[in-house]
């Protein structure tokens, strides 16, 4: 597929403006030329009629008396009129009685009309000769006695017309040059802020949210610049929001929430979730023998490992409660793979705890041991809190069961409810299930331990 030729906006605007100016000049010249030709024709008719009317009255008696001297004198006198090239008179029989150009045959003599009893003027314009022929019957009383004809040249009028057209062309070319200059200025004026916006957009795509452009004018371009600045602010806000979300949920989940905000149920909704609790065993004893700085340091180091694991497995860290935290899989949307993913995350958390503990032991630092409990079931998902502070979390019996299982778990032990074991598939190894009573529940719940060795399947 051939790549389309790219023509810059500046060149498009300049060429379009130039084309409009050139078309206007050519069109104006054509209209002026047409109007000038029409006006010259009307002037020739008007002036020829005036000369014919005056001369026909003055020459009637000399024609009757055959006074050729007087006839020629009158013809010489009237031939001095502007544009008159030749005047000649014919008698009733068609013979030439007088000519303003002596000894010269009439230029358009063969175009003369026959003498008749009508007083209408015959007029014809000969484009090939640049002449016009006007004729009129001479009357004595009501009797036709001859014909008088005048040959008009449009040369004087063509000279005037050419001068007007030349002046128009000079002014038109000057206007064209000015319009081209204006087109050049307009093109630069329009494209400069657009180029600035394009460069700013490239920078924005590179992650630079510090851009704030100054509007170059108070018009639509200025509105476009203001809109760009507002867009940058909103994108920056979205970026900050996404970065904040990523601290609590996985990157993929954060993008899904931002692209589909309707997934966040502001009023609360009942849906299936997997809840995992992890807590440091004997933390009270540990905190009593450590300084406050050491206590905070050990929590931060372990949480730095564990929270990253949760986020990597599409979970959200819903609560950090000092020596423990709650992770939820399935919000804002529960997927069929979440039971398996939650158990894989629990296994990865156990390995991360071992890795962190080994690193601390090599540095002769105290270590912590965690117990975990996981359960699946329905929970109430939504924003909970007050107008001062809200938290998107899960509440309900499922959360309580997972918390009780975590309390029963021994160091490095992961207790899993049978409800979750039945949904996990065949890729995990569990101990034999056994019943345990849970505080606040009328009946026992069957649980099993998630073993370290997993099946290859």
Image (cartoon, grey):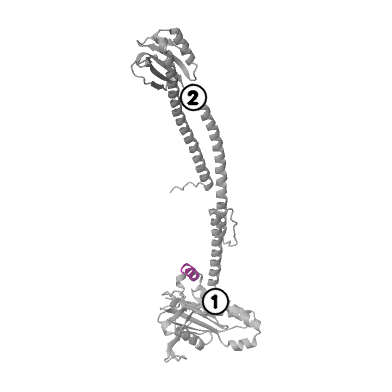
Mark 1, other Cα within 10 Å: few <14 / some 14–19 / many ≥20: many
Residue 19 location in percent, x, y? 49, 40
Residue identifier under label 1 = 307
Q: In the image, which residues are magenta?
A: 253-260
Quarter the C terminus occupies: bottom left
Marks 1 and 2 sit apart, C-alpha to C-alpha, by 98 Å
Residue at 43% x, 17% y is 150
**Mark number, residue 391:** none
Q: Nearer the viewer, mark 1 or mark 2?
A: 2
Foreground residue, 449 or 165? 165
Q: Is residue 312 magenta?
A: no
Residue 258 location in percent, x, y? 49, 68
> Magenta span: helix, strand or loop, mainly?
helix
Residue 71 location in percent, x, y? 44, 10
* Helix, strand or loop under label 1: helix
Mark 2, other Cα within 10 Å: few <14 / some 14–19 / many ≥20: some
Residue 203 location in percent, x, y? 57, 58
Residue at 60% x, 78% y is 300
Examine the image and state in which quarter residue 243 appears: bottom right
Residue 154, compared with residue 203, is above or below; it is: above
Residue identifier under label 2 = 157
Residue 358 visible in this rendered orientation of the protein? no
Residue 181 visible in this rendered orientation of the protein? yes
* Helix, strand or loop under label 2: helix
Foreground residue, 14 or 240? 14
Residue 11, compared with residue 447, is above or below; it is: above
Q: Is residue 259 magenta?
A: yes
């Amino acid at each position: 597929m051939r790549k389309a030729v790219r023509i810059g906006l500046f060149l498009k605007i300049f060429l379009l403006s130039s084309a409009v100016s050139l078309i206007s000049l050519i069109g104006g010249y054509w209209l002026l030329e047409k109007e000038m030709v029409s006006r010259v024709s009307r002037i020739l008719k008007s002036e020829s009629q005036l000369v014919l009317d005056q001369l026909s009255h003055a020459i009637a008696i000399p024609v009757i008396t055959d006074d050729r001297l007087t006839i020629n004198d009158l013809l010489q006198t009237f031939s001095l009129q502007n544009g008159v090239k030749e005047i000649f008179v014919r008698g009733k029989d068609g013979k030439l009685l007088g000519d303003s150009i002596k000894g010269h045959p009439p230029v358009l003599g063969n175009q003369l009309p026959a003498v008749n009893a009508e007083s209408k003027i015959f007029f014809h314009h000969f484009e090939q000769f640049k002449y016009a022929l006007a004729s009129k019957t001479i009357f004595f009383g009501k009797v036709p006695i001859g014909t008088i004809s005048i040959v008009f040249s449009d040369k004087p009028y063509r000279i005037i017309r050419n001068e007007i057209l030349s002046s128009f062309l000079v002014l038109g070319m000057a206007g064209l040059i000015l319009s081209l200059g204006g087109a050049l200025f307009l093109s630069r004026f329009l494209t400069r802020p657009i180029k600035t916006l394009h460069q700013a957009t490239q920078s924005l795509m590179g992650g630079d949210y510090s851009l704030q452009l100054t509007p170059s004018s108070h018009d639509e371009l200025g509105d476009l610049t203001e809109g760009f600045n507002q867009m940058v602010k909103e994108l920056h806000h979205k970026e900050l929001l996404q970065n904040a979300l990523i601290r609590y949920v996985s990157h993929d989940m954060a993008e899904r929430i931002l692209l589909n905000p309707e997934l966040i149920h502001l009023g609360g909704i009942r849906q299936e979730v997997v809840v995992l609790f992890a807590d440091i065993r004997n933390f009270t004893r540990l905190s009593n023998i450590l300084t406050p700085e050491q206590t905070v340091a050990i929590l931060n180091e372990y949480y730095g490992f564990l929270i990253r694991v949760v986020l990597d497995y599409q979970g959200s860290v819903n609560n950090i409660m000092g020596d423990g935290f709650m992770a939820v899989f399935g919000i804002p949307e529960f997927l069929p793979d979440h039971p398996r993913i939650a158990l894989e995350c629990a296994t990865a958390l156990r390995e991360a705890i071992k890795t962190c503990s080994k690193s601390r032991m090599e540095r002769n630092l105290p270590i912590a041991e965690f117990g975990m409990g996981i359960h699946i079931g329905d929970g109430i998902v939504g924003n909970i809190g007050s107008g001062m502070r809200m938290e998107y979390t899960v509440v309900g019996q499922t959360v309580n069961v997972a918390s009780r299982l975590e309390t029963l778990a021994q160091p490095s032990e992961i207790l899993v409810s049978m409800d979750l074991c039945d949904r996990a598939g065949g890729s995990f190894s569990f101990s034999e299930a056994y019943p345990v009573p849970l505080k606040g529940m009328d009946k026992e719940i069957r649980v099993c331990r998630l073993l370290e060795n997993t099946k290859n399947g």
